[in-house]
Amino acid sequence: MSAELDPRWEWIDVGTYGNPDQWIKGECNHLTPDPVHAQPTDELVAHLCPDCNTQLPAEWYP
Ligand SMILES: [Zn+2]
């Protein structure tokens, strides 16, 4: 895998014999989720991934 690829995402190798270094962005790895706290209890209720805007479970750990 090329070092230039963003580690926040899965990358799918779509290279061909004549053009071997081709990648398309796949699944998000959700590496930097932001915790979401309920108010006013401050209970951790979810995480939100800023890279793909997906809501993740409170117990999410990348
Ligand atoms: Zn994500």
Image (tube, rainbow, N blue to C red):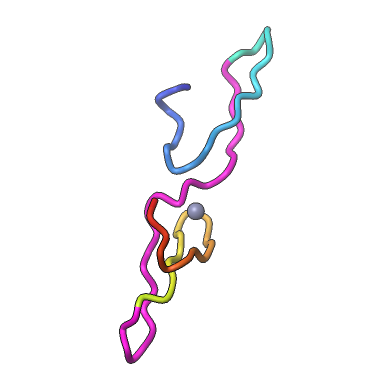
Residue 37 vs residue 57, the one in the foreground: 57
In the visual, does 49 lie left or right of 11? left
Q: Which residue is at 47% across, 66% downward?
A: 57
Q: Which residue is at 65% across, 24% downward?
A: 14
User: Could you tell me residue 47's position as x and y percent?
Assistant: 43, 66
Residue 8 vs residue 38, the one in the foreground: 38
Q: Residue furthest top?
A: 18
User: Could you tell me residue 43's position as x and y percent?
Assistant: 34, 81
Instruction: From this view, report whether residue 50 is shown above or below residue 25.
Output: below
User: Could you tell me residue 61's position as x and y percent?
Assistant: 38, 55
Instruction: From this view, report whether residue 45 is shown above or below residue 56.
Output: below
Q: Does the magenta stretch include residue 62?
A: no
Residue 4 vs residue 35, the one in the foreground: 35
Q: Is residue 39 magenta?
A: yes
Q: What stretch is highlighted in magenta?
A: 21-43
* Quarter holding residue 13: top right
Q: Which residue is at 44% across, 43% downward?
A: 8
In the visual, does 15 lie left or right of 44? right
Give the mark count: 0
User: Could you tell me residue 54's position as x and y percent?
Assistant: 54, 62
Q: Which residue is at 57% across, 44% downward?
A: 27
